[in-house]
Image (cartoon, rainbow, N blue to C red):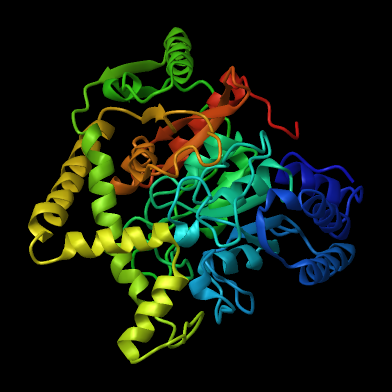
Amino acid sequence: MASSSTIQEYHKKLTANSNTCVDTVNYYLTKIEEKKHLNAFTAIFAKEALQKAMELDAKRKDGEPLKKLHGVVIAIKDVICYKGHKVTAASKILEGFTSVYTATAVQRLLDEDAIIIGSCNCDEFAMGSTNENSVYGNVLNAADETKVPGGSSGGSAVAVQAGLCMVSLGSDTGGSVRQPADFCGIVGIKPTYGRISRYGLIAYASSFDQIGIFSNSVYDAALLLEVMSGADEFDSTAIENGQWAMGNEHVDKKYKIVYFKEALHHPSLDKEIKENILALIDKLKSEGHTVRAMDFDLLDYVVPAYYVLTTAEASSNLSRYDGVRFGYRNKDSVKDLTDFYKHTRSTGFGKEVQRRIMLGTFVLSAGYYDAYFSKAQQVRRLLADKTKAIFAEYDAVILPTSPGTAFTFGEKTDDPIAMYLADIYTVFANLTGLPGISVPLFKHSNTMPFGLQIMTAKTDELTLLQLSEHLMQHYKTYQHLNN
């Protein structure tokens, strides 16, 4: 059995009886075993995936119509709960913990007859940009195994990149879906904040977190978004569903697009990435689209504001991991309860998580709250006002996804500030709640893929998806590994 390039193609094969769900699951299980050195998975649900596949094949044989995700093989990031399965957030602190409920997003996939094949490796508690902060070790980029896959959803990205599943779920707090999609040469979408329920997503920073999707096509991402989105009684921030029908009405549409002058002329941006995006802009203009540069004097404030606010929220969210009620506990030489907390959290959390908890506690402390946290909230308000004005005039904003292509393991681990600054183009969407996507359009002379980031107004995922599909059809120069 050969893999199908899209869910639609896969369903056609199932309907024509030229493929079965059991064959498909076995195919992916074989691929996962062949590529296990990539370290993309933390757990494989082989037995139950095959059982579900047999049930679906029987349903089809009995003439039941196919649901939207019938037999679609999906992997989920190890921060998303699935009842009866281990969820660890790639951290020692959750060692041995089994989820007691299923995330709303996962349940909605299952309700449409999807098959969950396993959990994917990630940076611990989704804190990182390289997947080097996992208790399970590094995930390798399938395009070049000496390079990082990006993070924090590196395992989910590589699972799709290397053909180990059809689509996968990640989470995006500051670029953790779009940046690994960029490094791995696949599609990665972060919806509007609240578009997909966060119920069952282990929290990093609650006002930033959003479940996102990795796929090989925009249409597959749109289908999963349609299935998972919508209001949820378990998440008060979840919003009503939107319109997803991606017909051909966008084919001849002329878009009004803006880019930030400071972003494309930033000293950190790779010269080749800049040249490719500028060339794309010229092509879009020649086709009749409006593409304009805009001064954006807040760009250098987005990373500091993001890290002040997210670490503050993380210091609160991660306080529940104390070793008393669940997960890992360190009882060595414990004198009292306070000593027990210190020992457990010091040995249970990795260095990057500890760094962010301490930073968050610092910015929330009485003497520094106004100087840091309040100021960061003011920046967030200014950004929200700015974006509202932008989308009153334009359909979309385009930016690089990352300042450079995937880099070598260990290259930035000794300089956390340099690592944080590499998030300069992605954190904007999370600060403002905008939907954003990275589409794999380009290939660098160093052989690594890179994408273009697109953002649209809040709740306007339809324009985001339509513009992305237009660009993929007309301007893609990079072909995916499995094509």
Name of the residue lying farthest toward the bottom:
336
Location of residue 165 with respect to 101 vertically, above or below: above
Location of residue 144 with respect to 373 vertically, above or below: above
Location of residue 199 with respect to 20 vertically, above or below: below
Give whichever of 30, 365 is nearer the camera. 365
Asked if one can make out residue 223 in the rendered structure from this viewpoint, the answer is: no
Name of the residue lying farthest toward the front:
333
Residue 312 x %, y %: 25, 61
Quarter holding residue 181: top right
Residue under the image location 86 percent in, 57 percent down:
26
Residue 331 x %, y %: 46, 87
Asked if one can make out residue 465 in the rendered structure from this viewpoint, the answer is: yes
Residue 45 x %, y %: 74, 68
Residue 302 x %, y %: 25, 40
Q: Quadrant of the C terminus?
A: top right
Residue under the image location 13 percent in, 48 percent down:
378
Q: Is residue 48 left or right of residue 92?
A: right
Give whichever of 132, 173 is nearer the camera. 132
The number of numbered discs placed on residues in the rendered structure image is: 0
Residue under the image location 17 percent in, 44 percent down:
379
